[in-house]
Amino acid sequence: FLVSDTSLTEADVRLFVTLIRFDEAYSVHFKTNTRSVTASPALLNYCRAIYQMPHVAETLNMQHIKLFYYCSNPTLNHYSIVPRGTDFEMLLKQTIAEGEKHYVHFL
């Protein structure tokens, strides 16, 4: 994790909720589509590790996230078009291969 090898911290939670929104909402809505979480094995595995912790997956509602970002600001998306996008949550459900358990280290 970001600041601890054994404990989830507030920094991890804040990064996780940002990263899970990035490919599905931010990259299109805010036009930040030159990079993606799915293209970065370290970031994707970081998200998987947190998503697969007990009780985390049940708190994620990707459809609600997408509807909020694409339908709440008619100035940016006049017709409230919600792109299908990738099935990011399906990627989070996949197990992390033993050789790929590398996370982003910021220390």
Image: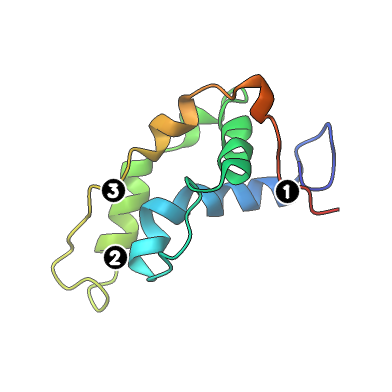
For image coordinates 46% across by 55% down, the residue present is 22
What whole-number distance in Å separates the C-alpha atoms at marks 2 and 3?
18 Å
- Tell me the residue that label 2 is attached to: 72
Label drawn at residue 22: none
Q: Amino acid at mark 3?
A: Gly
* Labels 3 & 1 near each other (Cβ < 8 A): no
Residue 85 badge: 3
Secondary structure found at label 2: loop
> Residue at image x 21%, y 55%?
82
Could you tell me the amino acid type at mark 2?
Answer: Ser
Which residue is pictured at 64% across the width and 52% down the height? 14
Real-space Cα separation, disc 3 to disc 1, in angstroms: 28 Å
Residue at image mark 1: 10
Q: State whether residue 53 is above or below residue 78.
A: above
User: Is residue 17 or residue 5 the one in the foreground?
Assistant: 5
Q: To which quarter of the image does residue 34 belong?
A: bottom left
Does 69 sit left or right of 57 as displayed? left
Could you tell me if the residues under marks 2 and 3 are in contact, i.e. CB atoms within 8 Å? no
Determine crowd level at label 1: few under 14, some 14-19, many 20+ residues with C-alpha closer than 10 A: few
